Amino acid sequence: MQTNFQKPLVFGLWLITFLFSSAALAQSNYTLNGTITDKNNGETLFGASVFLKGTTIGVVTNEYGFYSITAPEGDYTLNISYVGFSEINQDITLDSNQKLDFEITEFSTELEEVVVTADEPERAILRKPEMSVAKMNIATVKQMPVVLGEVDILKSLQMLPGVTNNGEGTGGFHVRGGAGDQNLVLLDEAIIYNTSHMFGFFSVFNADAIKDVKLYKGGIPARFGGRVSSVLDVRQKDGNSKRFAATGGIGIISSRVAVEGPIFKEKGSFLVAGRRSYADVLLKAAGEDNSVSFYDLNLKANYNLNQNNKLFLSGYFGRDAFELGESFSSSYGNSTGNLRWNHIFNERLFSNLSAVVSKYDYDLGITAAEFDWVSSISNYNLKYDLKYYLSNNFKLDFGASSIYYDFDPGQIIPTSETSAVNPMTLDRKKALESGLYINAEHTLTDKLTAQYGLRYSAFSRLGGQAMVDYANDQPVVYNQALGIYERGTEVGETDYEKGDAIKRFGNFEPRLSLAYQLNEVSSFKAGFSRVAQYIHLLSNTASATPLDVWTPSGKYVAPQLSNQYAIGYFRNFKDKVYSMEVEAYYKNTDNRIDYIDGSDLIGQNTIETEILNGESRAYGLELLLRKNEGKFTGWIAYTLSKSEQRTPGGNAGGLGINDGEWYNTPYDRTHDISISGAYKLNDKWSFGTNLVFQTGRPVTYPNEQYEYEGISVASYAARNSDRLPAYHRLDLSVNYKPNRKPERRFKGEWVLGIYNAYNRKNAASISFGQNFETGANEATRTAIFGIVPSVTYNFKF
């Protein structure tokens, strides 16, 4: 029997065969290909530009530094450039297909820090049909001031338009009004389910181990799928293939070190990077019973089999631990592994085969109740991606992937014979998600370039368990008498064998982006993307927590389907010293999970009785102004936006949640302004600053109260109709590089930082209660912290 997935697979294979058969171009055209690397350490460079001067022929290197360009026979000057590196101009005679690898030299050997920067020539940026994309480079520039002195990629991303957090000290990030679970976060292609350490104070990404970062806020390429809001693609360093080297830093809360070097007689390289916090040690020394700590470890190695084949092995292991005296303990962490094989078939066709495993797990221990709770989500991913350089005007990406999910929602384990808690194991859930895609980048005219593609995704909720059946197939019903939603009536169970599919889904996901270059300094872009998301994070709190549970789509939970439309205007000023990006977007999402009032998600085996399917929409305007050159550099980012959700009662009856009216999502921010600047006084001293202002997070406050049998009962306003006070803060940093001899390999710097310099007590929450002494009602503001100074010593040798 031919499945829905097999049909597009057959079509895709036919299309690939057709493309191979049409590979031969006119005999007067020849292809030049190769790899661009950093001369200092052998790292491949993603996004390096390769152009033939005097022509419009050029490309940028892919994630593995590979390029391929085709041009008529003749003599040319080949230009190779990359931000922060010296250009190469080499005369070539193109009279045959050739392979040329290049090593380029960094301008400076200062310590590497995280910055947001364009990494292509401006002409390529204006013409490239890519919008709603933020790129970050680990480059030789000023460190942005962040909390506790730690370089943090996620906090740097939150300084860009359309990206925000959900309050101080919270984990994750939100893109264009989307929830945290709608972001696909990849570390060397492996899925990361929790991006934070210490409940959001640090991210899981150690900057010493990261090579580059790319965030797709919209216009998501067809090779990505599974999340409807954004894709954060993070790539680890390959390791120094030239010599042994080390980088690191010592801070007041944590320290880190990374070691890298060549292996196998310089046919390969390795990287080992680790971080460890010592807040637990400091708390114990201060006589505290509480404890909080984290560690993470990044590993990577690669080996060149020959000039056309290369192997990579990478991994990440991180864990957090938290203890509240002897009454409560919790730990959670991510672990990933990826084995990749790069293969160059010929001068036009590049491929990458990856086998990836990822796991997120957590455990919770309650001493007083004498039980432990453990839960996890694991996935195993096999993917094959190919890039075919058909011509300079037409490049093709195509491939397939398949992910097997194993959801373990939780086990409750009594820790003693006297425990009042009974052991319980929630049903494990299995699922298979597959995808097939094809995507083209097509230069239609000298001014118009298009990127268009199609992804077909298929998802199966697999059997091996019994599913509850409900009257009228309704797990949630509306109780008219009480005016509440409640559990539907169970009428039996259906057993599904391991080989059965409980529910199947399939979706076509078209993608389209256009770029029209108006003149040499400006361009107009537009894009559309449709994305399906088949797994969901169950959380009725405003911020993600380690105890949140993932669940697959199935019999009662439909996949999220999102359409996003965007238009933008891009312009350079004063010979590219200044640049401006303006984008407007609209995004709607169907089948967004919403929670009935009083929903109970903890230890819930029939989660369908606690939720309803609704819809969400988000729209906004983003502005980014940059100063790219000079002693003072930086940007101003402003976002004007709206994010709403609506959940009618549907077949369950009743008006729905919030009477079926649109209400603000917890991620709605009307105004979001970020100003970031860096000033280099001289070779020793440099300064940085961040200024942030955000409209307060939506919350629900009580608006009246009444007494019932002597008990005061609060009545609440419409959902998320109120807001916390506005959030704002100022961060400052000073970098000092002591005198050093240029020939010395060891280099160090001091970083002094002040987070929240004017000690703003930003509200993380506001709770309401009654003063037992006066009987008056009171509102209590909770702030995570005020001013936080930090000192860090960074080194490199």
Image (cartoon, grey):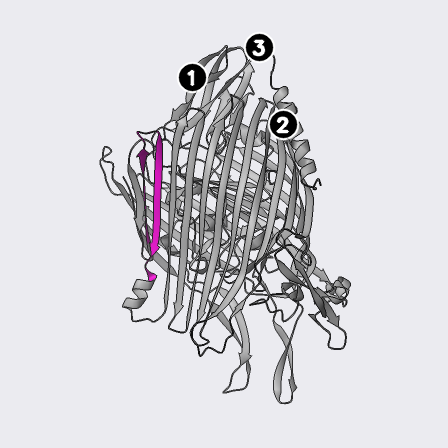
Q: Main secondary structure of the magenta part?
A: strand
Q: CA distance from mark 3 to mark 2?
A: 25 Å
127 vs 6: above or below: above
Residue labelled with disc 2: 16
Does the segment drawn in magenta span residue 261? yes
Label 2 secondary element: helix
- Chain-order first, disc 3 or disc 2: 2
Does the segment drawn in magenta span residue 19? no
Which amino acid, by three-letter code, is at mark 3?
Ser
**Residue 776, label in figure:** none
Report crowding for label 2: few under 14, some 14 to 19, many 20 or more residues within 10 A (C-alpha): some
Stretch of the chain drawn in magenta: 255-279
Label 3 secondary element: loop
Which amino acid, by three-letter code, is at mark 2?
Ile
Does residue 648 show up? yes
Residue labelled with disc 3: 28
Residue labelled with disc 1: 90
Tell whether 505 sits left or right of 71.
right
Which amino acid, by three-letter code, is at mark 1?
Gln
